[in-house]
């Protein structure tokens, strides 16, 4: 009698163990199947400068601010090194974000202080104005075109952390080369969603940044073709800079393609699209065609 009960209990135990193992296998299979069948998440929206084997990335907000800095430098006919200095400074001071707060009364991209004569809070929060004020002071620094970039940034900013700028110099140089047009076809962005085409917003942003360095002709959309902007630049570098500006603002203004000379960039939500050669275009090397 006891032996039978023992045998019965043992059998039940083994049966339960087998059922548990089967349930575990089924659970693992179900988890794996759901994991494998779930499509991968789309990549985060990002912009990237790629020059030879080096790259540097910014998010869309940072990219738009960086493009403004490059545009204002082009308007003032400043060399790409000026963009490197300004980007080095803004990366340290604000992370290239137009902050409405800071130490004491510091504000904006460069954390400029109204109490120190940089302008009113409203002016400093305008990235076009604050960039211009930065360059106003930068060009008064002795040997700014040849001196150490971190030292020049410190001469402008008078920061309590004078050595902090150096950590951003290499990244800023790479970004500046792509955004200033010094290195053509080096800038791309991932554009997610379906931003509403807004040629007027892009035109306003570009003309504020570049001033007389560009002329913009807007062509409205028709039933046969999308809206477009034709941008005449004062030179090849300015054209490539303006092209990078349009790409940087694609997530905000719905740009779908940018053409410079024989090269074209197309917006993608999944990859950083490269610039590819196109033969069926009448765009020259000093002209940018932006399609929405």
Image (cartoon, rainbow, N blue to C red):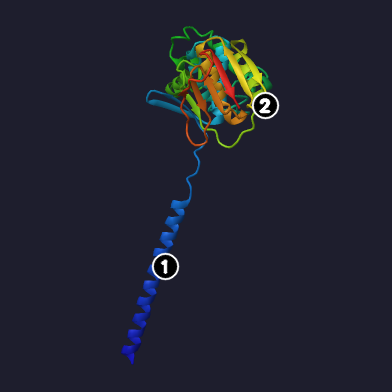
Query: How far across and down, in percent of the image, does residue 195 sit?
Result: 61, 33
Which quadrant of the rendered structure holds the N terminus?
Answer: bottom left
Q: Which residue is mark 1?
A: 23
Res. 291 image quadrant:
top right
Query: How far across and down, in percent of the image, does residue 92 sit?
Result: 50, 25
Q: CA distance from mark 2 to mark 1?
A: 61 Å
Seen from the viewer's position, the closer of residues 34 and 264 is 264
Q: Which residue is mark 2?
A: 222
Please tell me whether mark 2 sits on a helix, a strand or a loop.
loop
Residue 29 vs residue 102: left or right? left
Residue plotted at (46% across, 7% down): 143
The residue positioned farthest toward the bottom in the image shown: 1
Please tell me whether mark 1 sits on a helix, a strand or a loop.
helix
Q: Which mark is residue 191?
A: none
Residue 85 vs residue 210: left or right? left
Q: Mark 2 or mark 1: which is in front?
A: 2
N-term mark: 2 or 1: 1
Please tell me whether residue 60 is drawn above or below residue 285 in the rendered image. below
Label 2 crowding class (10 Å Cα cut-off): few <14, some 14-19, many 20+? few
């Amino acid at each position: 009698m006891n032996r039978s009960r023992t045998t019965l209990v043992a059998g039940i135990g083994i049966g339960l163990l087998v059922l548990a193992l089967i349930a575990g296998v089924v659970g693992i299979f179900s988890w794996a199947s759901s994991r494998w069948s779930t499509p991968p998440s789309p990549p985060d929206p990002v912009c990237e400068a790629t020059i030879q084997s080096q790259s540097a990335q910014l998010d869309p907000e940072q990219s738009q601010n960086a493009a403004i800095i490059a545009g204002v430098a082009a308007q003032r006919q400043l060399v790409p090194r000026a963009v490197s200095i300004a980007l080095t400074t803004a990366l340290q001071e604000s992370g290239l974000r137009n902050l409405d707060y800071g130490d004491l009364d510091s504000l904006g991209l460069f954390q400029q202080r109204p109490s120190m004569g940089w302008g009113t809070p409203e002016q400093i929060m305008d990235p076009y104005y604050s960039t211009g004020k930065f360059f106003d002071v930068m060009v008064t620094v002795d040997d700014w075109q040849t001196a150490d970039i971190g030292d020049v940034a410190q001469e402008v900013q008078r920061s309590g952390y004078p050595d902090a700028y150096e950590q951003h110099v290499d990244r800023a140089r790479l970004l500046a080369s792509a955004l200033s047009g010094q290195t053509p076809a080096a800038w791309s962005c991932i554009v997610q969603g379906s931003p509403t085409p807004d040629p007027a917003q892009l035109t306003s942003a570009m003309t504020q940044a570049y001033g007389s360095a560009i002329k913009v002709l807007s062509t409205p959309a028709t039933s046969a073709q999308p809206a477009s902007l034709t941008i005449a630049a004062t030179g090849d570098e300015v054209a490539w800079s303006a092209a990078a500006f349009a790409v940087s603002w694609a997530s905000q203004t719905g740009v779908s393609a940018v053409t410079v000379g024989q090269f074209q960039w197309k917006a993608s939500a999944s990859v950083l699209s490269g610039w590819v050669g196109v033969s069926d275009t009448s765009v020259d090397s000093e002209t940018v065609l932006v399609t929405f």
